[in-house]
Image (cartoon, rainbow, N blue to C red):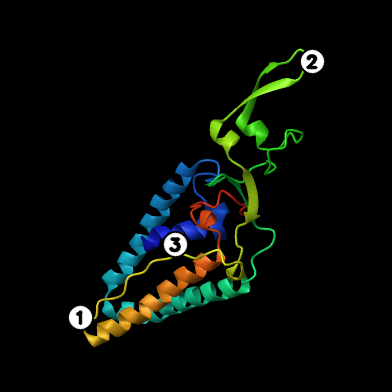
Amino acid sequence: MYVIGAVEIFLNYMAPSLSLYGDFHDDPAIMYHNFRTYGTILLIIVGIIVFIGVKFVSKFAPVALFCVIVSLFSVYVGVFTNYHGKEGLEICILGDRLLSKTNYTCSKDQNDTNSLFFKYCSEVNKTDKGESLYSCDPYFETHEVTKRLAIPGMSSNVFNNQGFSRCSKSIPAGTLAATITTSLIYLSGVLLFGATFDNLFMRDKFGDSIEVV
């Protein structure tokens, strides 16, 4: 899980050009091929490190711990840096569905040839006066198109309802302390992310709703 997550973040947000099988934005299956290849390479490297022995793993531990600390610190920096939202990073939503970012205008305006109207509607006939008659997708017809910030920030109060369960009190004190510490970090990350990002944007696995540079 961690290996696949590392590969996904690396290719999707850090180095898309290192995709081995072409542009994964055009074909999601390409991303899965990258998962398999890069994931296998990373697993082999991790396996070699473990196979060498405990002493080597112990020497490698500070490096891994440093990476974890930097990652956690970056999360909190990002959350508070975008406390008031991030201007310019917008998503287009049709009803409650997040749309992929392509060459279109996020509107139903029939006077705009790049609008969503011409993506979800097709001309079927013309009137006696030469006016076009269109047939549109039923979902498109019954729902509104809206554009909003992908990262509205904590100040926008985008996140209200979350449910969490408490840790069991029956485990030993040492394990309890470790569990509480880890839980606080993870839960605070969930809360802060929920308070910062638009919920539909968080479900966009490959970042298709925005332009990934």
Q: Amino acid at mark 2?
A: Lys
- Classify residue 95 as left or right of residue 32: right
Tell me the CA gap for discs 3 and 1.
34 Å
Q: Quadrant of residue 122?
A: top right
Q: Is residue 69 left or right of residue 16?
A: left
Helix, strand or loop at mark 1: loop
Mark sitting earlier along the chain (1/2)? 2
Residue shown at 40%/57% (left/top)? Answer: 4
Q: Nearer the viewer, residue 39 or 162?
A: 162
Give the label, 1 or 2, closer to the camera. Answer: 2
Work out whether 156 lies above or below 200.
below
Label annotation for residue 6 = 3
Q: Are marks 3 and 1 in contact (CB under 8 Å)?
A: no
How many marks do you count on the picture? 3
Residue annotated with mark 1 = 170
- Mark 1 crowdedness (10 Å alpha carbons): few <14, some 14-19, many ≥20: few
Secondary structure at badge 2 equals loop
Q: Which three-letter amino acid code belongs to the residue tagged 1?
A: Ser
Q: Measuring 30% from the left and 65% from the top, which residue is drawn there?
A: 47
Is 179 placed above or below 12 here? Answer: below
The mark found on residue 142 in the picture is none
How far across and how far down the image is residue 203, in percent? 48, 54
Return the residue nearer the eye: 178 or 12.
178
Q: Amino acid at mark 3?
A: Ala
- Residue 130 at what x, y percent from top left? 78, 16
User: Where residue 97 sits: x, y (%)?
Assistant: 53, 45
Question: Which labelled disc corresponds to residue 129?
Answer: 2
Q: Splitting the image into 4 quarters, where does residue 106 fall?
A: top right
Q: Nearer the viewer, residue 82 or 35?
A: 82
Instruction: Indicate the secondary structure of the residue bearing disc 3.
Output: helix
Task: Point out the residue furthest to the right here.
Answer: 129
